Amino acid sequence: MSLDVYQRLLALSRARAVPAASRAHRHLSPRPWLLTGYHLAGEPSAPVAIRYGSFRDSPKLLTVAEPRDRALRFAALGGLARDLATYLSRYTVTEPVVRATGSGRELEVDHCCVDAPQLVVPNEATAHWVGLLGQYLRTLDDPVLAAAGAHLGWIASRRHLPGSSVLLTATDLLTAHWRTGQLPTEDGHLGRLLAWIEPPAGADAWQAARDAEAMPPAGPASDPSWDQVVLRPALERAKQQGDVRRLKLAAAEVLDGAWRDTWAAIDLVRMLPPGEHVAKRWESDRWSWTRHRERVLAGTVSFSARLSDVPAYRFLHELETRTAALERQMALDDPLVMARYLATGEAVAGVVFKRDPEHTVVNSGGRSVLRPLLWVRTAAAFDRPAGTELWWGKVGMVVRGSTDDTVELMVTSGAVTRPKLNLLPDTDAEVVLAPFGPLQYFPDNLPDELPWPTRSSRPKPAPEPEQDDDLDTDLAPAAPAAAAVDLGGTPGRVPGPRADPGDGVPAGGTAAPGEPRGAL
């Protein structure tokens, strides 16, 4: 049984959510920008009402009396765009940063924004809607709306990168730190999720979750019965009589719960101490925001609907390496997360009861090298085979053998010279040996041939004509003119170096030039 399943069963028996983390693994801005709203059923580009702002007690409410009327829609969204620009203008201050370039042997001074904006929404559906709004607005001729669309597009693009905190959903924020006794799909309902974590006094989680489910959803799609009973009459009144008071009251009432619940989710996570690596991941977001601002100011910001070949490969590579790095960092920061690896046997915890710091072995060159030995007494059997790599901080070890309650390990890196023997754990020290070594940087090395999912669908070139035996084969035939300008080459084959290899992410990019890809 995995630890996640056990925690869900424990929450089920207690009728209350149990902690899944003891550290906050998402960066929380002191002044985030919250957004929640509704759109017409089946028409994401037709917002009915949006509540937004960075002040808990004084949010702004945007309503559209006739969402299908483009003029009214653009007028309302223009107010949202201007307020968004005002919020983003607070994050323009930069500071000089000394960074390594190229192979890391040269240094240069670059400028990075000291902070970056953060958008928080109630659920995944609203986060997806933010991306659709950005895609819709940036195609318009109005420069204010187009700029807002570019910013929303960048914010939405960061959502796909593990470890980014630019766009947070309240449901993801809570499920990353608590386990409930309900199904994972039910955790997508923000009201039910909060009911499990903090049920009202005198009520258990089941009753609180049922009560929360009876309330209007957090958007952006609304409840059909609410549409019929409340929204439709309010829209008809606004259209026929020009009276929008009923629509504003209905929108304020239905969005009040989502607004309040989103702030409650932020407050719950803020009570946890931040993980050690959170600041480093936020630094990556700050660099991305800096580059995005530069592209907006230069008028070069763009977004690609579909990636092909090398950009697609680099983006998938970025997702994979960031996912692995995030899992590693969360485990090293948080004992509760590390407990999952202890439960599966990938990590081992125990007490050092014996050590031999003077142990040596003969390497392949015939030279005697220092390889200290450690013996750790464990509470449970560790059944990983000999040769398994484990780490204690920056000290790397391999398993030499194990019994029901003992693991013998040989140090292979980090403390294999006499000046560094003091890095070894002392006798009687409690240790947790994990499969995570020091922070790795993931170079962007391209393979000779791309994996098939990232290859383009371009037709294969026509086969070259066969050589005549009477021709002088010592002379290579001249290349056709078309081949001289074809930079793509054979589908799946990586082209030669180009002046601008691209960011490896969708146009509008997320990674700062010069940064190691995949490093969080």
Image (cartoon, rainbow, N blue to C red):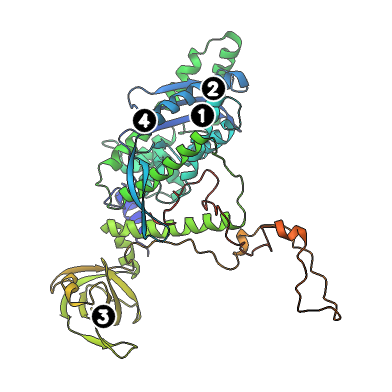
Q: Which circle marks residue 410 in the picture? A: 3
Q: Secondary structure at mark 1?
A: strand
Q: Residues within 10 Å of mark 3 (few under 14, many from 20)?
A: many
Q: Residues within 10 Å of mark 2 (few under 14, many from 20)?
A: many
The residue that appears at 38% across and 56% down in the rendered structure is 326
Residue ID for mark 4: 90
Report the amino acid beneath label 3.
Met
Q: Which circle marks residue 38 in the picture? A: 1
Sequence order check: which comes first, mark 2 or mark 1?
1
Residue ID for mark 2: 231
Q: Secondary structure at mark 2?
A: helix
Q: Position of residue 431 (x, y in %)?
A: 21, 68
Residue 62 or residue 30, whichever sits in front: 30
Q: Marks 3 and 2, Cα distance to the nearest angstrom?
A: 69 Å
Sequence order check: which comes first, mark 4 or mark 2?
4
Sequence order check: which comes first, mark 3 or mark 2?
2
